[in-house]
Amino acid sequence: MPRPMKWRKVCCLPERNQFGPLRAEANLENFVKMTVDEYETIRLIDLEDLTQEECAKQMNIARTTVQGIYNEARKKLAQSLVNGKVLFIEGGEYRLCDGQGKGKGCCGSGCQRHGHFE
């Protein structure tokens, strides 16, 4: 019997979910899809300067899981930048936080960035 899936806690959704070259067509060969939980690892580790251990605690998952998610996210960023592909951020195995978190990396009770796309 497989383990029950553990949802990744995400503090906030990105303000925009599409990035890429100007005037690029997003067809099946010209886009990369990044999940919201992959985006969250990039935000926490690269922008908020959390360690993988701190990121794991914030997202309520194992450090090894964070490492795998982060590696995939970096590959997707590289594909978008190097190959000029449109990057979409959507979907994934996540739940938005309740805005009550405290400390580095969490937007806390003042969170205004909870979006509506999935």
Image (tube, rainbow, N blue to C red):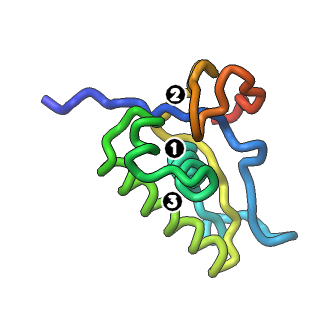
Residue at image mark 3 = 73
Q: CA distance from mark 3 to mark 2?
A: 18 Å
Closer to us: 51 or 82: 51
On screen, residue 63 versus residue 13, left or right, reads left
Closer to us: 99 or 4: 99
Q: Disc number at residue 37?
A: 1
Residue drawn at (58%, 58%) of the image: 46
Category of crowding for the residue at label 2, using alpha-carbon neighbours closer than 10 angstroms: few (below 14), some (14–19), many (at least 20)? some
- Whole-percent x, y for residue 53 in the image: 38, 47
In this rendering, the answer to whether 68 lies above or below 103 is below
Instruction: Give, as a three-letter code, the residue at label 2.
Output: Arg
Quadrant location of the N terminus? Answer: top left
From this viewpoint, is residue 68 visible? yes
* Marks 2 and 1, the one that precedes in the sequence: 1
Instruction: Give, as a three-letter code, the residue at label 1.
Output: Asp
Quadrant location of the C terminus? Answer: top right
* Marks 1 and 3, the one that precedes in the sequence: 1
SS class of the residue under badge 2? strand
